[in-house]
Amino acid sequence: MTDYNRTAAALADLYGTEFGGKPSGRYRIPVKVLREMMGRRRLYAEDIAALTRALIEQGFVLIDMESFFVVMSANAFVNYRRVGKEAQALVG
């Protein structure tokens, strides 16, 4: 198992763990904590891309917010509105 897969599994486990006053669900994680989890001094674009891919395989999405990351279930996006040709015509 790679560092990315191990970290992705740990992030997925956190999703179902009670903390921050909530039983489970989406959460934000500081860059510093993520670096520590991965055992790295710096996180490069390649690291984030590999971790994102590993997390998607676990059914979660990693969103880079510059100073922190958000972990959400990929299922959260299933019921979002879809842009079709009609909606596209409204803006362009």
Image: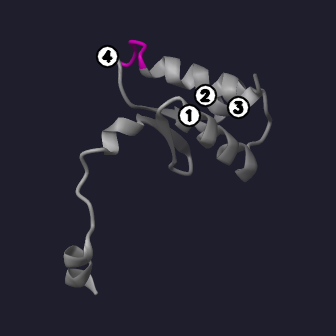
> Vertical placement of 18 versus 70: above or below?
above
Residue 88 lies in quadrant: bottom left
Distance of label 3 from label 4 (alpha carbons): 28 Å
Q: Nearer the viewer, mark 4 or mark 2?
A: 2
Distance of label 4 from label 2 (alpha carbons): 23 Å
| SS at badge 4 | loop
Q: For this rendering, which residue is in front, 65 or 47?
A: 47
Residue bearing mark 1? 57
Prevailing SS of the magenta stretch: loop
> Residue 45 placed where, x, y %?
71, 52
Please rate how many residues cluster around mark 3, counting C-alpha atoms within 10 Å: few if below 14, some from 14 to 19, many from 20.
Answer: many
- Three-letter amino acid code at the position of disc 1: Glu
- Three-letter amino acid code at the position of disc 4: Gly
Q: Which mark is residue 4?
A: 3
Residue bearing mark 2? 8
Whichever of callouts 1 and 4 sits on the residue coming sooner in the sequence is 4
Q: Nearer the viewer, mark 1 or mark 2?
A: 1
Whichever of callouts 4 and 2 sits on the residue coming sooner in the sequence is 2
Please rate how many residues cluster around mark 1, counting C-alpha atoms within 10 Å: few if below 14, some from 14 to 19, many from 20.
Answer: some
Residue 18 is inside the magenta segment: yes
User: Which portion, as a residue range, is magenta?
Assistant: 16-23
